[in-house]
Amino acid sequence: MTYNKRTKSLYMPYSKC
């Protein structure tokens, strides 16, 4: 997983959500 700083949530690299 990659940490999305913009939404402060974890998401899978292939997932846009």
Image (tube, helix red, strand yellow):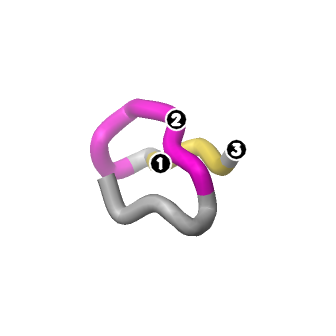
Label 2 residue SS: strand
Image marks 2 and 1: residues in contact by CB distance under 8 Å: yes
Residue at the far front: name it. 14
Q: How many marks?
A: 3
Label 1 residue SS: strand
**Residue type pointed to by label 1:** Asn
Please indicate whether residue 9 sits to the left or right of residue 13 in the image: left
> Magenta residues?
6-12
Q: Quadrant of residue 8?
A: top left
Determine which of the numbered discs, if any, sits on residue 13 in the image: none
The residue depicted at 61 percent of the width and 62 percent of the height is: 13
**Is 2 above or below relative to 10?**
below
Determine which of the numbered discs, if any, sits on residue 4 in the image: 1
Determine which of the numbered discs, if any, sits on residue 1 in the image: 3
Label 3 residue SS: loop
Q: Which residue in the structure is indicated by mark 2?
A: 10
